[in-house]
Amino acid sequence: MITSSGLFSIITFIYGLAVLLYISAWIFKKELPGKLATAATITAVTGNLIGIILRWIESYQMGYGHAPLSNLYESLVFFAFCIAALYLFLEFRYKLRIIGVVASPISFLAMAYASLPKVNSSIEPLIPALQSNWLIAHVITCFIGYAAFAVAFGISLLYFIKAGRDHQTGGVAGKIPHVDMLDELTHQMVMFGFLFLSAGIITGAVWANQAWGRYWGWDPKETWSLITWLIYASLLHARMMRGWTGKKIAVLCCAGFLAVIFTYFGVNLLPGLHSYQ
């Protein structure tokens, strides 16, 4: 019987195949590669979810019985799933397959990174501080927020490609929607991500109080989560109160996602309670 790790290895290749198909559909302007890309992404998301459930079952069979959200490997797998699932929602809701060109590579890279030998993929027992349902709520809400920011980042990249070429119908920019639509989608994704990141910070504070007896400790992860939150709060404030749109919002969105990446990976290089091993 296949293990969750084996299934995730297969899913990584399917995500990679989806990337190639989305890019082929964009460059060669063919419908068939696009349809195949969508089918590959649906297959990958379904397999990804089955793998997460299988890993949870394996944890119970080993006598640990915890949700598969406790280490870097499991978080990368869940991150890839959230991005791909959110992207599929956008594709079916707005009929915009072009976003797959920028969203699918992020899912693929997350899975590929998880497969590196330096990332520990073993299922291990949780330390007492991690044995809390608040941890599950904290991780799920944070990574749904991160996934929305990742998709918003991808849409911002499309904005930069499309900007100044609004009336171009040929070339690679011709398949990209109008900048106004990209700007609105970026705003919606940031609003969605901000809501979940806020919930993630709050549930994290409750978990911290339960585990360590304090709500906030200026741990590097906590500090950078706050910095990330402030960047996206500034983006939303500038849009609502100053009327910022377009390139300014796209730049802030990219800056916010860089903060997300550092919050996720960079703080692992620093000492702290949140460092993924």
Image (cartoon, grey):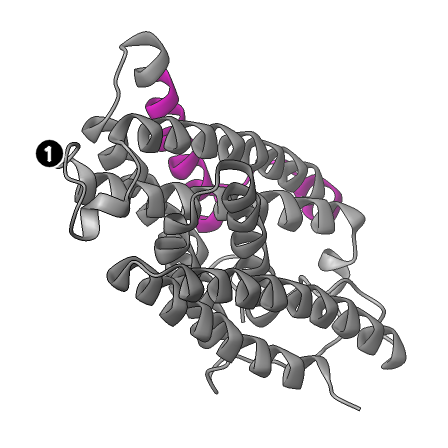
In magenta, the rendered stretch is 208-237
**Residue at figure coordinates x 49%, y 70% from the top left:** 15
- Taking the image as drawn, is residue 263 in sight? yes
Q: Is residue 142 left or right of residue 172?
A: right
Query: Does 24 appear in magenta?
Result: no
**Residue at figure coordinates x 16%, y 52% from the top left:** 171
Q: Give the dominant element type of the magenta stretch: helix, strand or loop.
A: helix
Q: Is residue 61 left or right of residue 204?
A: right
Q: Is residue 104 above or below residue 63?
A: above
Q: Quadrant of the N terminus?
A: bottom right
Tell me where residue 80 appears, x and y as whole percent. Answer: 53, 61
Q: Quadrant of the C terminus?
A: bottom right
Q: Is residue 217 left or right of residue 260?
A: right
Tell me where residue 182 appears, x and y as whole percent. Answer: 33, 33
Q: Check disc 1 and report the residue beneath it.
A: 164
Q: Is residue 126 above or below residue 200?
A: below
Tell me where residue 250 appears, x and y as whole percent. Answer: 26, 34
Q: From this viewpoint, which residue is outermost toward the front?
A: 31
Amino acid carrying mark 1 in the image: Gly
Query: Does 216 appear in magenta?
Result: yes
- Taking the image as drawn, is residue 76 in sight? no
Who is closer to the viewer here, 38 or 67? 38
